[in-house]
Image (spheres, rainbow, N blue to C red):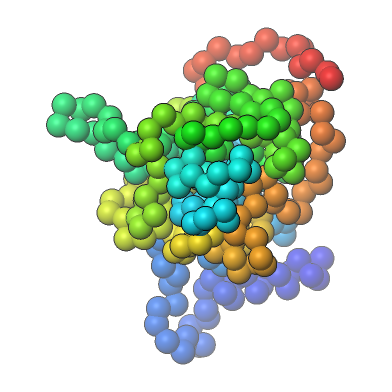
Amino acid sequence: MLAHTIMLLSLLAAADPTPGQAPAKEPAKPPASRPQASGPAKASEDGQAKPLVPFPHPLITEVLYAVPTGSEGDANGDGARNATGDEFIEIVNPHKRAIDLAGYTLSDKRASEKDKKGHAKSGAVRFTFPKCVLQPGQVVVVFNGFEGKWTGPVGDQLGAPPKGNESFAGALVFDMKNKSERSALANNADWILLSTRGDEPVQLVRWGTVEGTVANCPLIEDAPNAVRSSVQRTSLYGHLESHDQEGDYRFSPGRFENELQRPTIGSATSTTPEREPQPAPAPAKGKPGTKK
Ligand SMILES: [Ca+2]
Ligand SMILES: [Ca+2]
């Protein structure tokens, strides 16, 4: 109890200096672009750390937008470095209950732009998840996939992989199956937007001097420039840093340490997740997934 009180007090002190203690220098207010992830973990009223995104949303934990040159850039491990195909986004279920990724979309800035006729511009990155139950702490990696080759189970927009991929620490791996080299994240300035099946923004990770923003996005984070590595979250409640600050690895698709207990592999399809209310018809109840 005392520890919780101290933590809460320290959080309050960090976020809201008392008038008598003028901050040494302005501004006391954190940058608007990193409202939630630049400081310590938010605490709810009971003192428990809260995920950076509310239930039932997943959380982006790593982005490889600037693929390292040479063999060090072979993030999907197919033996060839591809500046487009080896890009990936890693996400996790940060909650204590299962969630369903169905309809969640990852997209870049290009995907938000339209040409004069109102059509989507070419070169966009956009991936919409199929039905995919994610247990607490379970990790997903979505590769760009351009010209990629795969070992082990890999899903796509039409279907989730039947199980985790041991080549990626047991994470569920998806392939965007991009057919154009131009459908890639821009190294100098771009973003990844996570949005719901109802097209509501959940999380925006951006880098470089990117123009524009996403209105009404509750979590906007500016990732550091990462020339020869990915950017990865320091913890489930932490901010995004260049991956090479954490050791010799330049990226770690599928590996994300967190405070949640990892579920037993194989239970992923056997638990019905709770879903936010949606207009779409509810799935049949009492129909457990096939056990393997
Ligand atoms: Ca590769
Ligand atoms: Ca990782």
Relative to 255, say whether 277 is above or below.
above
Question: Residue at (68%, 10%) from the top-left corner?
Answer: 284
Relative to 253, say whether 263 is above or below.
above
The answer to whether residue 106 is visible is yes
Q: In the picture, which quadrant includes the N terminus?
A: bottom right
The answer to whether residue 112 is visible is no
Question: Residue at (61%, 40%) from the top-left corner?
Answer: 78
Point out residue 208 in the picture as x, y percentages from the top left corner.
36, 60
Camera-side residue of 128 and 259: 128
Question: Residue at (50%, 62%) from the top-left corner?
Answer: 228
Image side of residue 85 versus residue 97, left or right:
left
Q: Residue furthest left?
A: 116
Image side of residue 194 versus residue 182, left or right:
right
Image side of residue 166 versus residue 205, left or right:
right
Location of residue 268 (image quadrant):
top right
Camera-side residue of 268 and 197: 268
Point out residue 81 in the picture as x, y percentages from the top left corner.
53, 47
Count of numbered circles on the image: 0
Point out residue 142 in the picture as x, y percentages from the top left corner.
56, 37
Question: Residue at (80%, 43%) from the top-left corner?
Answer: 262
Location of residue 201 (image quadrant):
top left
Relative to 280, say whether 157 is above or below.
below
Q: In the picture, which quadrant includes the C terminus?
A: top right
Camera-side residue of 39 and 5: 39
